[in-house]
Image (cartoon, rainbow, N blue to C red):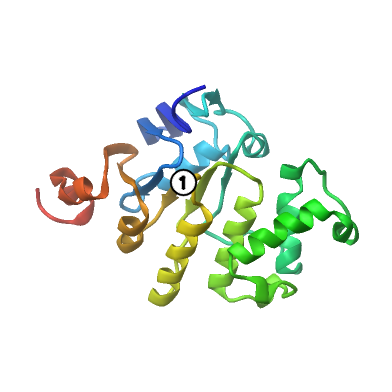
C-alpha cells in the first residue's frame, strides 16, 4: 500500500501535435486538501479528465492508493475509490433531492440500480441518503425536484452525489464558479465540513476559496506544475507571482 492516496508520475497528454499535459508529477497524502490553480488553458480540466478516466494518457501513470488507474473507465475508477464533480451540474433534474442522493449511494452499499419505487424499502440506502441530506443542509428540500433548486443548492447536491459513492478521494472542478460572495462563503464551509477526513483535489479560480481551503496548492502552467507547496509559500513564490498572479518576479 502506497503512503499516498494519489500519485501522478510523468503524465503526458497530447491532442495531435499539441502537448497539453507535459511530464506532470504530483503526490497527494491521505486527507490532504490540494487546490490546483493556473491560468486559462493551463490544462487543469484535462488533468482532472485524465485522473478520473474521461481521457487516457499519452504516457505516464496515475495511481490510486498504489493501484494503477490510468486507462481504466470512469466507473471502474469510481468503484476503486475516486469520485468527481463537474463544472456543469450533472444531476437528474426531474427527480427529487432525496432520490438523487439515493441513486448515488446504491453501488457503495452493494446494490445495483433499482426501480425508484423500491428505494423506500431499502433501509441502508435511506439512512445513508438521509445522512447526506442533513450534512448538505438540504433537509428542507428533501422532496423538491432538482429543477426547482437554486444554483447554489444544485452545486451542494452535486457534491452530495459525488460523496454518495463512498469514495475517499474527491475531485471538485470549480465548485464555487458563478456564486455570489455570500454563497461562496457558505459553500466553502460546507465543502470543509462534508469532505473532512477525505483526500480532496479542487480546481478553483477564487483565490479566497483556494487559500481558505487548501493545505497545499499546485500551480499548473502550460501543462506543467511549476510549484507545489503550502499556501503561504505559494503566495511568496516569485515564479508563481510572475506566471499566475501577474506580479513581475
Q: In x, y percent, where is residue 169?
A: 53, 41
Q: Can you tell which quarter of the image residue 77 is in?
A: top right
Decide if residue 91 is in sight here. no
Query: Relative to 67, is 12 on the left or the right?
Result: left
**Residue linked to disc 1:** 200
Q: Residue at 32% across / 44% down in the picture?
A: 216
Q: Position of residue 155 (x, y in %)?
A: 55, 65
Question: Which residue extends farthest left?
Answer: 249
Mark 1: which secondary structure? strand
**What residue is rendered at 82% in x and 44% in y?**
112
Query: Viewer-proximal residue, 33 or 77?
Result: 33
Q: Residue at x 35, y 51 (%)?
A: 214
Q: Position of residue 121 (x, y in %)?
A: 89, 57
Can residue 95 be seen here? yes
Q: Position of residue 56 (x, y in %)?
A: 54, 32
Q: Is residue 139 depicted above or below 88 in this figure?
A: below
Residue count near mark 1 (Cα–Cα under 10 Å), binned few <14, some 14–19, many ≥20: many
Count numbered badges in the picture. Answer: 1
Q: Nearer the viewer, residue 224 or 187?
A: 187
Residue 186 or residue 45, whichever sits in front: 186
Q: Is residue 244 left or right of residue 150?
A: left
Amino acid at each position: 500500500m502506497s503512503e499516498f492516496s494519489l500519485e501522478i508520475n510523468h503524465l503526458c497528454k497530447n491532442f495531435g501535435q499539441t502537448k497539453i499535459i507535459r511530464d506532470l508529477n504530483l503526490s497527494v497524502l491521505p486527507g490532504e486538501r490540494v487546490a490546483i490553480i493556473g491560468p486559462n488553458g493551463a490544462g487543469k480540466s484535462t488533468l482532472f479528465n485524465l485522473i478520473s478516466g474521461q481521457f487516457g494518457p499519452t504516457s505516464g501513470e496515475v495511481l490510486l492508493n498504489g493501484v494503477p488507474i490510468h486507462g481504466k473507465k470512469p466507473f471502474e475508477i469510481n468503484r476503486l475509490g475516486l469520485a468527481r464533480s463537474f463544472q456543469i451540474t450533472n444531476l437528474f433534474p426531474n427527480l427529487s433531492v432525496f432520490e438523487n442522493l439515493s441513486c448515488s449511494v446504491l453501488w457503495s452499499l452493494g446494490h445495483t440500480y433499482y426501480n425508484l419505487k423500491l428505494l423506500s424499502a431499502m433501509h441502508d440506502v435511506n439512512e445513508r441518503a438521509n445522512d447526506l441530506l442533513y450534512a448538505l443542509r438540504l433537509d428542507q428540500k428533501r422532496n423538491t425536484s432538482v429543477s426547482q433548486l437554486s444554483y447554489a443548492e444544485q452545486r451542494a447536491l452535486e457534491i452530495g452525489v459525488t460523496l454518495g459513492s463512498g469514495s475517499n478521494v474527491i475531485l471538485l472542478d470549480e465548485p464555487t464558479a458563478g456564486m455570489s460572495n455570500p454563497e461562496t462563503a457558505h459553500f466553502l464551509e460546507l465543502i470543509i465540513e462534508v469532505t473532512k477526513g477525505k483526500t480532496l483535489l479542487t480546481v478553483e479560480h477564487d483565490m479566497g476559496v483556494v487559500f481558505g481551503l487548501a493545505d497545499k496548492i499546485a500551480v499548473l502552467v502550460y501543462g506543467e506544475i511549476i510549484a507545489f507547496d503550502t499556501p503561504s509559500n505559494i503566495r511568496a513564490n516569485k515564479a508563481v507571482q510572475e506566471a499566475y498572479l501577474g506580479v513581475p518576479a
